[in-house]
């Protein structure tokens, strides 16, 4: 199956700092990237959807100026949490969708391993 | 009303028993339905996808979909302790290309020896 990596796997930062999370699809071309977050003991909530080379579309209630998404290439998308605060502490998970290097669509959902963000 | 709702749980079953997980959804335009398993601290992993009414079996897992009732379920036969996890129901309005997923709140399953 497709391989998706996220970096870092966990991060602890002070309130007010910015944190960048990378999501790489290692063996297929991610034309679309979904970013989810999961607060403790809650389910996954979609934050935003980005298409390669275009601006991201954010879900209601998600601040686009706080959660900056860059999807400049088919193998890399980044989520930057700017001026992080304790309420941003969460598990952030990317989910790419696209085509395999040998063609065909990824009709199977893949999730990255997630990034645990803790803001002190 | 939640868009995707799962039976509240937690659910506890003995090893070897059948675990039954249920999910209802509100959007009649939903076309794709998924069951994920999530272990603590890990990201979800896909167990089953189902797109048309009826049953779909894969090993010990059977997904059932009833679009008229807006209901999807997952049966786990011969439950094992390793099946202990949170099970997430997810729904998409996309076709077989999954698109944006709306998740239920999850049901915690414990299989005890």
Image (cartoon, grey):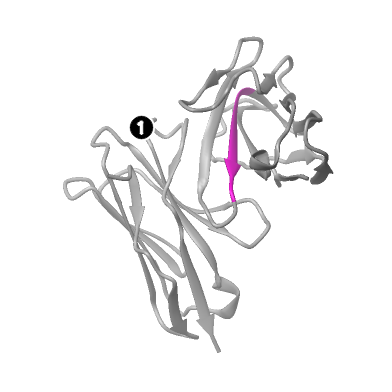
Q: Pinpoint residue A26: horizontal percent, then vertical percent.
A: 77, 34
Q: Is residue B59 visible?
A: no
When asked about the image quadrant of residue A82, the answer is top right
Instruction: Check if residue B4 falls in the magenta segment.
Output: no
Image-based side of B47 in relation to B32, left or right: right
Residue A97 image point, x, y percent: 58, 30
Residue occupying image coordinates x 76% and y 40% = A5
Q: Residue at x 55, y 89 (%)?
A: B113
The chain letter for the residue carrying disc 1 is B
User: Going by the picture, which residue comes out furthest to the top?
Assistant: A54
Q: Residue furthest bottom?
A: B113
Q: Residue furthest left?
A: B68
Is B1 placed left or right of A30 in the picture? left
- Secondary element type, mark 1: loop
Q: Which residue matches tag 1?
A: B93
Residue B72 seen by the camera: yes
Range of the magenta residues?
Answer: A31-39
């Amino acid at each position: 199956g497709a391989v998706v990596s996220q970096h870092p796997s966990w991060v602890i930062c002070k309130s007010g700092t910015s944190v960048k999370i990378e999501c790489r699809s290692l063996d297929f071309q991610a034309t679309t990237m979904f970013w989810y977050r999961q607060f403790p003991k809650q389910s996954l909530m979609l934050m935003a959807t980005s298409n390669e080379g275009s601006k991201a579309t954010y879900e209601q209630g998600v601040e686009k100026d706080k959660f900056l998404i860059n999807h400049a290439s088919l193998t890399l998308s980044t989520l930057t949490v700017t001026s992080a605060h304790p309420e941003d502490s969460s598990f952030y998970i990317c989910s790419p969708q696209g085509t395999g290097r040998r063609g065909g669509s990824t009709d199977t959902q893949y999730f990255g391993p997630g990034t645990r963000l803790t803001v002190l | 009303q939640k868009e995707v709702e799962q039976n509240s749980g937690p659910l506890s079953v003995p090893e070897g028993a059948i675990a039954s997980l249920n999910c209802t959804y509100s959007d009649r335009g939903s076309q794709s339905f998924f069951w994920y398993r999530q272990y603590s601290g890990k990201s979800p992993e896909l167990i089953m996808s189902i797109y048309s009414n009826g049953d779909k079996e894969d090993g010990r897992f059977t997904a059932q979909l009833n679009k008229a009732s807006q209901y999807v379920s997952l049966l786990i036969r011969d439950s094992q302790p390793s099946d202990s996890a949170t099970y997430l129901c997810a729904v998409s309005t996309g076709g077989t290309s999954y698109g944006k997923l709306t998740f239920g709140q999850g049901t915690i399953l414990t299989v005890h020896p």
